[in-house]
Image (spheres, rainbow, N blue to C red):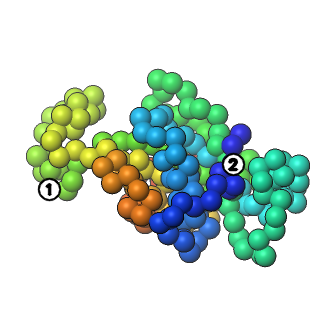
Amino acid sequence: MLSMSNLSPSPGTPMAASPLTRAVLEIDEYAAGLGWDRPARLFALVDTARLRKQEPRLARQLGLDQDDAGKIQLTPIEQDELPKGMALDKFLGTVAWPASVVGCALTVERLMLPPSAEAAVPSDLNDKQLAKWVAGHPERQEVRLTVGVLRDGSRESAVRLREKDAASEVLTGATLVPGLAEALAATFS
């Protein structure tokens, strides 16, 4: 179990307004520190004040023993590594969270095409052929997607392009990665 709350934002990391946005950016920064070409990572999001109250020893271990004057905070806690060889959507279909988890987040690397290239995608390709076609496309972009959802339906995403690998270049928005957000939200059903 790993918490990133003791990591301080790097210079250039924007101060986020919502606790979910802050948690997603914190996870993005943590993943950036690990480098590229990494497997997907899943995180439970827990209410920091509740964690301090219910698990004071664990909170101390994670460096969360200082109260932040009533600010709502979420603590990301990394889960065990995802099973190798299992499709992400299939794996997420097996995930269930205890009531103490108020949200979850996932960070995963993908290849994406700009909207201008999507019109050229052949329609007769299966998933494996499509992945190979995208990997060979000259306009492909390597990205790291970090998506978080809360039980209440709130969503947030961060997208980091490998070619612009800086905290100040991370794009954020609730609707950037809707399919992955839906899959994460389904883990609370």
The amino acid on which the numbered mark 2 sits, given as a three-letter code, is Ser
Q: Tag 2: Cα neighbours inside 10 Å, few (<14), some, or many (≥20)?
A: many
Q: Tag 1: Cα neighbours inside 10 Å, few (<14), some, or many (≥20)?
A: few
Rendered residue at 48%/47% (across/down): 32
Which residue is outermost to the front? 11
x and y, in percent, of residue 131 in the image: 26, 34
Q: Nearer the viewer, residue 30 or 130?
A: 30
Q: Which residue is mark 1?
A: 116
Q: How many marks?
A: 2
Q: Nearer the viewer, mark 2 or mark 1?
A: 2
Q: Which residue is mark 2?
A: 3
Is tag 2's residue or tag 1's residue first in the polypeptide sequence? 2
Rendered residue at 57%/57% (across/down): 26
Residue 51 located left or right of residue 18: right
In the figure, residue 70 lies in which quadrant? bottom right
Real-space CA distance between mark 2 and mark 1, rounded to the nearest whole angstrom: 39 Å
Q: Which mark is residue 135?
A: none
Which residue is outermost to the left? 120
Does the rendering let one see residue 104? yes
Mark 2 residue element: strand
x and y, in percent, of residue 14 in the image: 50, 69
Residue 155 located left or right of residue 128: right
